[in-house]
Image (spheres, rainbow, N blue to C red):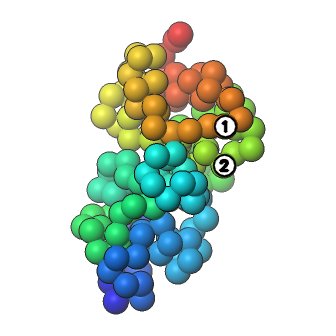
Amino acid sequence: MTTLTVNGKPHVVQAAPDTPLLYVLRNELALNGPKYGCGLSQCGACTVHIDGRAVRSCSTPVSAVKGPVTTVEGLGSPERPHPVQAAFIATQAAQCGYCTSGMVMTTAALLKATPKPTDAQIKAALDGNLCRCGTHMRILAAVRKAAGVQA
Protein backbone atom coordinates (compact mmCIF):
# COMPACT_ATOMS: atom_id res chain seq x y z
CA MET A 1 0.00 0.00 0.00
CA THR A 2 1.10 3.52 -0.81
CA THR A 3 -0.30 6.88 0.19
CA LEU A 4 -0.46 9.53 -2.52
CA THR A 5 -1.70 13.08 -2.33
CA VAL A 6 -3.70 13.66 -5.49
CA ASN A 7 -5.51 16.91 -6.20
CA GLY A 8 -5.02 17.95 -2.58
CA LYS A 9 -6.44 14.79 -0.98
CA PRO A 10 -4.57 11.80 0.48
CA HIS A 11 -5.36 8.41 -1.03
CA VAL A 12 -4.20 4.97 0.08
CA VAL A 13 -3.65 2.91 -3.06
CA GLN A 14 -3.23 -0.84 -3.36
CA ALA A 15 -1.04 -0.90 -6.48
CA ALA A 16 2.30 -2.69 -6.64
CA PRO A 17 5.29 -0.31 -6.43
CA ASP A 18 6.15 -0.73 -10.12
CA THR A 19 2.63 0.09 -11.32
CA PRO A 20 2.57 3.17 -13.56
CA LEU A 21 1.01 6.18 -11.85
CA LEU A 22 -1.38 6.50 -14.80
CA TYR A 23 -2.98 3.15 -13.97
CA VAL A 24 -3.43 4.13 -10.33
CA LEU A 25 -5.00 7.47 -11.27
CA ARG A 26 -7.41 5.94 -13.76
CA ASN A 27 -8.17 2.54 -12.24
CA GLU A 28 -8.01 3.14 -8.48
CA LEU A 29 -8.89 6.82 -8.21
CA ALA A 30 -11.25 7.07 -11.22
CA LEU A 31 -9.46 10.16 -12.57
CA ASN A 32 -9.85 9.86 -16.31
CA GLY A 33 -8.32 13.18 -17.38
CA PRO A 34 -4.85 11.70 -17.93
CA LYS A 35 -5.06 9.45 -20.99
CA TYR A 36 -3.17 6.36 -22.09
CA GLY A 37 -1.64 7.31 -25.41
CA CYS A 38 1.57 5.45 -26.13
CA GLY A 39 2.80 4.04 -22.82
CA LEU A 40 6.30 5.21 -23.72
CA SER A 41 6.35 8.87 -22.56
CA GLN A 42 6.36 10.04 -26.16
CA CYS A 43 2.89 11.52 -26.72
CA GLY A 44 2.11 13.52 -23.55
CA ALA A 45 -1.53 12.43 -23.20
CA CYS A 46 -0.82 11.14 -19.68
CA THR A 47 0.88 14.31 -18.38
CA VAL A 48 0.24 15.27 -14.75
CA HIS A 49 2.09 17.47 -12.29
CA ILE A 50 4.18 15.96 -9.53
CA ASP A 51 5.34 18.61 -7.11
CA GLY A 52 4.48 21.22 -9.74
CA ARG A 53 6.49 19.64 -12.58
CA ALA A 54 4.95 18.17 -15.73
CA VAL A 55 5.57 14.41 -15.65
CA ARG A 56 4.49 11.53 -17.89
CA SER A 57 2.42 9.30 -15.64
CA CYS A 58 2.50 6.29 -18.00
CA SER A 59 6.16 5.67 -17.26
CA THR A 60 6.38 6.90 -13.67
CA PRO A 61 6.10 4.04 -11.19
CA VAL A 62 3.88 4.85 -8.24
CA SER A 63 6.86 4.15 -5.94
CA ALA A 64 8.75 7.07 -7.53
CA VAL A 65 6.07 9.63 -6.63
CA LYS A 66 7.48 11.71 -3.78
CA GLY A 67 5.36 14.84 -4.01
CA PRO A 68 1.76 15.89 -4.50
CA VAL A 69 0.12 14.91 -7.79
CA THR A 70 -2.19 17.22 -9.71
CA THR A 71 -4.28 16.00 -12.61
CA VAL A 72 -6.33 18.12 -14.99
CA GLU A 73 -9.30 17.48 -12.70
CA GLY A 74 -7.43 19.17 -9.84
CA LEU A 75 -6.11 22.09 -11.87
CA GLY A 76 -9.50 23.80 -11.99
CA SER A 77 -13.18 22.99 -11.96
CA PRO A 78 -16.06 23.52 -14.38
CA GLU A 79 -17.21 26.41 -12.19
CA ARG A 80 -13.71 27.88 -11.77
CA PRO A 81 -11.44 26.68 -14.56
CA HIS A 82 -7.71 27.31 -14.37
CA PRO A 83 -6.70 30.14 -16.77
CA VAL A 84 -5.14 27.58 -19.12
CA GLN A 85 -8.33 25.51 -19.16
CA ALA A 86 -10.37 28.66 -19.78
CA ALA A 87 -8.09 29.68 -22.65
CA PHE A 88 -8.32 26.25 -24.28
CA ILE A 89 -12.12 26.47 -24.07
CA ALA A 90 -12.25 30.05 -25.38
CA THR A 91 -10.05 29.27 -28.39
CA GLN A 92 -11.71 25.91 -29.04
CA ALA A 93 -8.28 24.31 -28.96
CA ALA A 94 -9.60 20.76 -29.03
CA GLN A 95 -11.04 18.68 -31.79
CA CYS A 96 -11.19 15.09 -30.53
CA GLY A 97 -9.84 16.25 -27.14
CA TYR A 98 -7.69 13.19 -26.45
CA CYS A 99 -4.46 15.17 -26.13
CA THR A 100 -6.00 18.16 -24.39
CA SER A 101 -5.39 17.08 -20.80
CA GLY A 102 -1.68 16.64 -21.50
CA MET A 103 -1.49 19.89 -23.45
CA VAL A 104 -3.20 21.79 -20.62
CA MET A 105 -0.96 20.27 -17.94
CA THR A 106 2.21 20.92 -19.93
CA THR A 107 1.09 24.49 -20.61
CA ALA A 108 0.27 25.15 -16.94
CA ALA A 109 3.77 23.98 -15.95
CA LEU A 110 5.32 26.13 -18.69
CA LEU A 111 3.46 29.26 -17.59
CA LYS A 112 4.39 28.67 -13.97
CA ALA A 113 8.08 28.62 -14.94
CA THR A 114 7.85 31.15 -17.80
CA PRO A 115 4.82 33.44 -17.38
CA LYS A 116 5.28 35.27 -20.71
CA PRO A 117 6.77 32.70 -23.09
CA THR A 118 7.73 33.39 -26.67
CA ASP A 119 6.26 31.30 -29.47
CA ALA A 120 9.56 29.42 -29.64
CA GLN A 121 9.37 28.61 -25.91
CA ILE A 122 5.74 27.48 -26.25
CA LYS A 123 6.58 25.24 -29.20
CA ALA A 124 9.60 23.79 -27.38
CA ALA A 125 7.57 23.05 -24.25
CA LEU A 126 4.79 21.35 -26.23
CA ASP A 127 7.13 19.56 -28.64
CA GLY A 128 6.63 16.22 -26.87
CA ASN A 129 2.83 16.49 -26.83
CA LEU A 130 1.20 15.01 -29.91
CA CYS A 131 -2.07 16.18 -31.44
CA ARG A 132 -3.23 14.07 -34.32
CA CYS A 133 -6.24 16.28 -35.12
CA GLY A 134 -4.13 19.21 -36.23
CA THR A 135 -5.34 21.86 -33.79
CA HIS A 136 -1.80 23.10 -33.27
CA MET A 137 -2.56 26.70 -34.21
CA ARG A 138 -5.50 26.87 -31.80
CA ILE A 139 -3.40 25.30 -29.06
CA LEU A 140 -0.71 27.93 -29.65
CA ALA A 141 -3.42 30.62 -29.51
CA ALA A 142 -4.74 29.15 -26.25
CA VAL A 143 -1.29 29.24 -24.64
CA ARG A 144 -0.79 32.84 -25.76
CA LYS A 145 -4.23 33.75 -24.37
CA ALA A 146 -3.51 32.10 -21.02
CA ALA A 147 -0.17 33.91 -20.85
CA GLY A 148 -1.63 37.23 -21.96
CA VAL A 149 0.84 37.56 -24.85
CA GLN A 150 0.20 38.53 -28.46
CA ALA A 151 1.41 36.71 -31.56
- Residue that numbered label 2 is attached to: 98
Q: Report whether 13 appears left or right of 23.
A: left
Q: Residue at x 47, y 75 (%)?
A: 24
Expressed as whole percent of the image width and height from the top left, the position of residue 94 reads 70, 38
Q: Is residue 109 visible?
A: yes
Q: Earlier in the sequence, mark 1 or mark 2?
A: 2
Tell me the SS state at disc 1. loop
Residue 33 drawn above or below residue 63: above
Residue 119 drawn above or below residue 64: above
Q: Nearer the viewer, residue 33 or 35?
A: 35
Q: Amino acid at mark 1?
A: Arg
Q: Which quadrant of the structure image shows residue 32?
A: bottom right
Expressed as whole percent of the image width and height from the top left, the position of residue 56 reads 41, 54
Q: Residue at x 45, y 61 (%)?
A: 58
Expressed as whole percent of the image width and height from the top left, the position of residue 15 reads 41, 84
Tell me the SS state at disc 2. loop
Q: Nearer the viewer, residue 141 or 133?
A: 133
Q: Amino acid at mark 2?
A: Tyr
- Residue that numbered label 1 is attached to: 132
Whole-angstrom CA distance, mark 1 to mark 2, is 9 Å
